[in-house]
Image: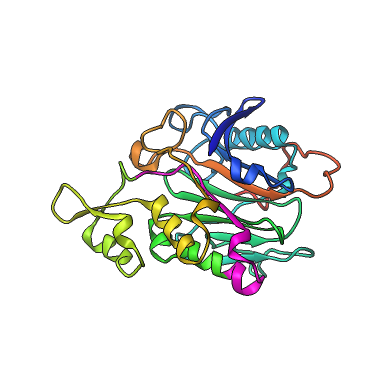
Amino acid sequence: MFRLNKIHSIQYYESSFLSGCDFLTHAFCTRLGGVSEEDYASLNISFKEGDLESKVLQNWNRLSMAFAIPLDNFLTLNQVHGDDILVIKPFGDYLPSDGTLDYDAIVTTRENLAICIKTADCVPVFIVDRTKKIIAAVHAGWKSTALEITAKVVRKLLDKYGSNPRDILAAIGPAIGLCCFELDKESADSFRNQKDHQDFLFPGEKPDKWIVDLPQANRRQMINCGIPEENIDLSPLCTFCRQDLFFSHRGSGGITGRQLNFLMIRGEAPCRVLTIGEEYPKIQ
């Protein structure tokens, strides 16, 4: 079950499944609580959508202060709608040697690193091994979902870390719902090789149009990897329908901000929370 919380001005959702893990901090943020205006009102965290940089920096600072996480401890990806996974070691340097972050998922056991997913209709998926204390954050747009990125992340936990499927909890955050997401036939055909695709792929009302339930597609991928259904928390909120709460790329016609979804293993408390400075190598 998802519940709405508020810290200072920041309104966000938590999954009760993940809240039961005392080593975690997580949030599926709404668009509320920031300083951006007009199409980007108000907690836009993306520098790439046309918002004023000064406003975006203030929004990040508000997030940092609200959750008592230094700005330098937030890690965002370029999110290229693929299926590559960034694996971060528990210690040492973790940025790729070429400096690029062209990935759509992160897996780590590192403490005090908030792994982030930016969304405005795409599906944010958090996956946690509650026994081994492994976390993953997945950006599952329709292309990444068609590539079965969530299943690949689960298999990474099972094969690389030796996770037991019954120890894995997952939370699928607010995203565009079955009610509002339509694809053409060619795009929809990319889902047909997935097991149980009839549970999330349906004919649309218009010729050669198909309805795709992206949250359900990602849920089925995890179930088909052996994750018990009762271990998966699914938000009922549609970002297109609830543009009062969330940014929606489709709902806005493409001009909008991005909300933040983040997950972190808590370690020893950072010595201080960083405020706005001049360089943000990990915030893009």
Residue 41 placed where, x, y %? 49, 29
Which of the 4 image quadrants contains residue 15? Answer: top right
Q: Which residue lies furthest to the left in this view?
A: 207
Q: Does the magenta stretch include residue 9?
A: no
Residue closer to the observer: 170 or 164: 164
Residue displayed at 40% across by 32% down: 242
Q: Quadrant of residue 81?
A: bottom left
- Indicate left or right for 138 with 95 as reference: left
**Location of residue 105 with respect to 280 vertically, above or below:** below
Task: Residue at 72% x, 49% y: name it.
Answer: 73
Residue 16 position within the rendered picture, expressed as x and y whole percent measured from the top left? 60, 40
Query: Can I make out residue 82 in this image?
Result: no
- Colour scheme shown: rainbow
Q: Horizontal and vertical percent for residue 17?
A: 60, 45
Q: Residue lying furthest bottom in this view?
A: 159
* Residue for point 74% across, 48% down: 23
Nearer-the-camera pick, 97 or 62? 62
Which span is picked out in magenta? Answer: 156-177
